Image (tube, rainbow, N blue to C red):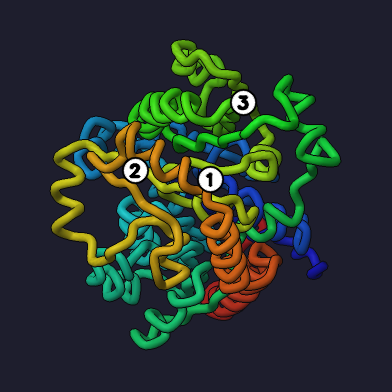
Amino acid sequence: MTAQSPNPARIMMVAGEASGDLHGGALAEALLKEDPSLQIVGFGGTAMRRAGVEVIFDIAQLGVVGIFEVFLHLKSVWEAYRMGVKTLESGVDLLVLIDYPDFNLRLAKAAKQRGVPVVYYISPQVWAWRAGRVKTIGERIDQMLVILPFEERIYTEAGIPCEFVGHPLLDEAASAQLKYPSKSAYLEGCGLLPEGTTIGLLPGSRHREVLSHLPTMLEAMALLAKEIPGLQLLVPVAPSLSKEWVLDLTRRVDLPLRCVEGEFQEVLRASDAVVVASGTATLQTALAQAPMVIVYKLSPLTYWLARRLIRLKSIGLVNIVAGRPIVPELIQAEASPERIRQEVGRLLKDGVARERMKGDLKEVAERLGAAGASSRAAAVILERLKRGRVMRERKSPRGTG
């Protein structure tokens, strides 16, 4: 543990969505473990608040998907930005940004103008689209902390201080407290059959994602149940969503189904196959080595624009990290009930394909590095914080008031 300063440092930490809140919570916990005197304020949710962050803006107001959908929430975004600038001006020693690039890079500019050093944890996906942001990052960010192995080279070649710290999902998987000793015990605890064929449905963490994906997933499972007896479903509910709201979306399906909260790892372990919305959850599923099918639907306008901007052939993080398509991706019209039924059915019936995918997923997990990302990120942040404070105190010693 580092020595506590008589004049506690103040960090502002900004996440913009549910996954960022989880990573921010783990990072805040690691920071406070090293220096309990730290004052951390910021934008976040349940995880960051629980870790000891003074949450001054709840990110539930910012959780929107899609380029055009953001315009519907401009008032909330503008209010958040104004609050962020006000907080910077109230006295902050370091700004830590977590993903959420369009908002965070703008806030980084405000921080730079006010002499506040900026650390960016979890890089914008510059390797997928808008590569020109690397130049902007170089102008506004003092230190990049990246979580995907190929990202470090992008920034170091651009002359931007960068360190690969590993993926925080490895920390979450390693520290997960499983409530049940086995898959069968968990299924029994859920009121499902241990011998049944269990499918995990992961429709996303935002309302619009769930509305776009869950009804289609459920329709696909109704089709699949006609050829696979004993089919049963598990739907983990994201912390940002209401369980009652998700349950209401499932009522039309006449299959054994349980919506569960706080049991994400248990669902992955218990599932014979998973249907997952593209995003961080694909890597979580990969770490559990659960065979999966990736789906994703955007609004037509957002998809039209994305097709013209995104440079990658794959959208699933698991395929991007693998460097090749190891998991089927069903996007837009391809994400139909019939196509989902086909792909999940193939995984359930073709043992060779299942084992090949599990082996590929194990390789992806190994590429993500070792557990300890949050601690490594915290160490870099604390060193930056110490260096910045020493330099400022040499120029103008900070008062005690």
Which mark, by number, is residue 296?
A: 2
Q: Residues within 10 Å of mark 2 (few under 14, many from 20)?
A: many
Q: Which residue is mark 3?
A: 230
Give above or below for 12 relative to 261. below
Residue located at (78% from left, 26% from top): 188
Q: Which residue is mark 1?
A: 349
**CA–CA distance in space, label 3 to label 2:** 27 Å
The amino acid type of the residue labelled 1 equals: Lys
Residue closer to the observer: 167 or 71: 167
Residue located at (52% from left, 37% from top): 56
Tag 3 secondary structure: loop
The numbered mark, 3 or 2, whose residue comes first in the sequence reads 3
Q: Residues within 10 Å of mark 3 (few under 14, many from 20)?
A: some
Q: For the residues carrying marks 1 and 2, which lies nearer the camera in this image?
A: 1
* Quarter occupied by the N terminus: bottom right
Please state if 209 lies on the left or on the right of 238 as rendered: left
